[in-house]
Amino acid sequence: MAMEHAASRAAFDQARQYIPGGVNSPVRAFRAVGTDPVFIRKAQGTRLFDLDGNEYIDYICSWGPMILGHAHPALLEGAAEAMGRGLSFGLPTDLEVEMARRISTAYPAAQLVRMVNSGTEATMSAIRLARGFTGRDKIIKFEGCYHGHSDCLLVKAGSGALTCGVPTSPGVPADVVKHTVVCRYNDLESVKEAFAANPGQIAAVILEPVAANMGVIPGKPEFIAGLRQLCNETGTVLIFDEVITGFRLSYGGAAQVYGVQPDMVCFGKIIGGGMPVGAYGGRREIMECVAPTGPVYQAGTLSGNPLAMYIGLRQLDYLNTHPEVYAQLEQSGEKFAAGVRDLLQKHGLPYQLQQMGSLCTLFFADHPVESYEDAVSSDTEAFAVYFRTMLENGIMVAPSQFEAMFLSAAHTDADLEATFAAMDKAFAAVKAARG
Ligand SMILES: *Cc1c(COP(=O)(O)O)cnc(C)c1O
C-alpha cells in the first residue's frame, strides 16, 4: 500500500502561504527530486516520524549534528534544568569557556575559539579575520565547496546552490565576489596558477578538507598537504571548513585524519548537538586580531548561548568519553558502502558509492567523482527515481544528488539491512525508468 502523505501535503500548502517556497532552507522543498516535502513531527534514535504517522530510517541526521541519533538521552539529561537557569544573558558564562577549552583540546590549531550561531557566520567571520590579519583582500575557494551563504563565499558553491542551479546568486554584487578566486578541487596546479596570478594578494585559502556539499569527495592527501605548503610559502591563512567533518571523521576532525593542521578552522553542526551553533578558531596571533583584543569587528547577541552550549557540550563530552563511537561509525560506513556496491553489482548499475567514515554519497555517475565537474555530470533524473522509491519504502536520504548521507552511532545492522531491502527496490525502479 502506498504511503499516505495527506497531512504533510496540507502543511506544505499552509507553509507556502507564509514562508517562501514553504521552507526555511531550499533543499527541504524536495524540488530536485520532484516531490513534496514531508513534515516531521518528532524523531528518536535513527527514526523520523512525519505528520501522517509514517516512520523513516533517517540518513539526513539534520545534515550532520545528530551524530548520536535523535533525542539522545546524553544530550537531553539536565537540559530542562539548564533552561530553568535562564535562556540567554548576553554576559559571559563558564559554559562558553568549557566549550572553547573542549574544542581547543580536541583541535590543536584552534588555540583560541570564538562561538557564533551558524556555520555561515563561522566562515564569514574567519574570512574577515584572515583578511584583517594579512591586510590582503583576495581569497581562494574551490568549485563545489559550500561554506554557508555569505556573499563572498557564494561563488560556485555546492549543496542547495548546486541543486537549484544558481551557483552564483543574484543579490551578490560583482564587486564583492571579485576578490574571490575559484580553483578546482583536488587540483593543486589550479591553486598554484591562482597564487602566481595574484602575487602577495591572497589572504586565505578556504576548503572543506573532505568536500561533502557536492556529494562526498574526499580531498586527496597530496592536495591537502600541497595547500599547506603553498600557504606556508606565501604567508596565506589556510582555513579548514570542518562544519561537517569536525568531530565526525575523528574527534580531531579531518585535520587529525590527514595529519595537516590549518591556521584557522570553522565548526558548526555537531558542536551544537542540534542547537544553532557555529565556531571559528585558529592560531593565537590571528585570533587576537578580533575585537576586543584586535581591530577586526565581530559580535553576536546570542553567541555562546547557554542552552546551546549546554547541549553541545553534552554531545562533545559523550564523544570524548566514548571513543569507540568513531570505530563504530567507521565500521558502519564500510558496511554500508559494501552493501550498496553489492546491490549495484546485482542490478548491473555503473554508479559510484563514495564513502569516508560516516559520510557517503551514491553518485549516479559511471565514473569516479573527484571534482565538481565530475559531480555535476551525474544522472539527477535517476537519482530522483531512487530517492522517491527509498522514501516510499521508509528510508530518508538527502533529497539531492549533491548532499552527503550521514550515518550516526545509532544506526544498527538491522537499520542497514532494512535500507538495503529498500535500495533493492529503488535500483529496480531506476532500471525500469531508464528503460
Ligand atoms: C552546513 C555547512 C555550512 C553552513 O552552516 P550553516 O549552519 O548552515 O550556516 C558551512 N560549511 C559547511 C562545510 C557546511 O556543511
Image (spheres, rainbow, N blue to C red):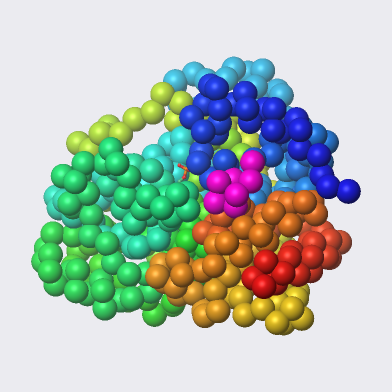
Q: Is residue 203 above or below residue 361?
A: above
Residue 149 image-quadrant placement: top left
In the rendered view, does 367 fall on the left or right side of 287?
right
In the rendered view, does 38 fall on the left or right side of 232?
right
Q: Which residues are magenta?
A: 30-36
- Residue 327, image x and y in percent? 70, 67
Front residue of 409/213: it is 213
Residue visible at 37% across and 50% down?
166
Front residue of 346/361: it is 346
Residue visible at 23% across and 38% down?
296
- Residue 265, image x and y in percent? 40, 54
In the rendered view, does 316 fall on the left or right side of 18?
right
Q: Where's the C terminus, which quadrant?
A: bottom right
Front residue of 151/366: it is 366
- 400 within the magenta span: no
- Residue 381, image x and y in percent? 57, 62
Residue 421 visible? The answer is yes
Residue visible at 61% across and 76% down?
351
Q: Is residue 6 above or below residue 399?
A: above
- Residue 419, image x and y in percent? 79, 61
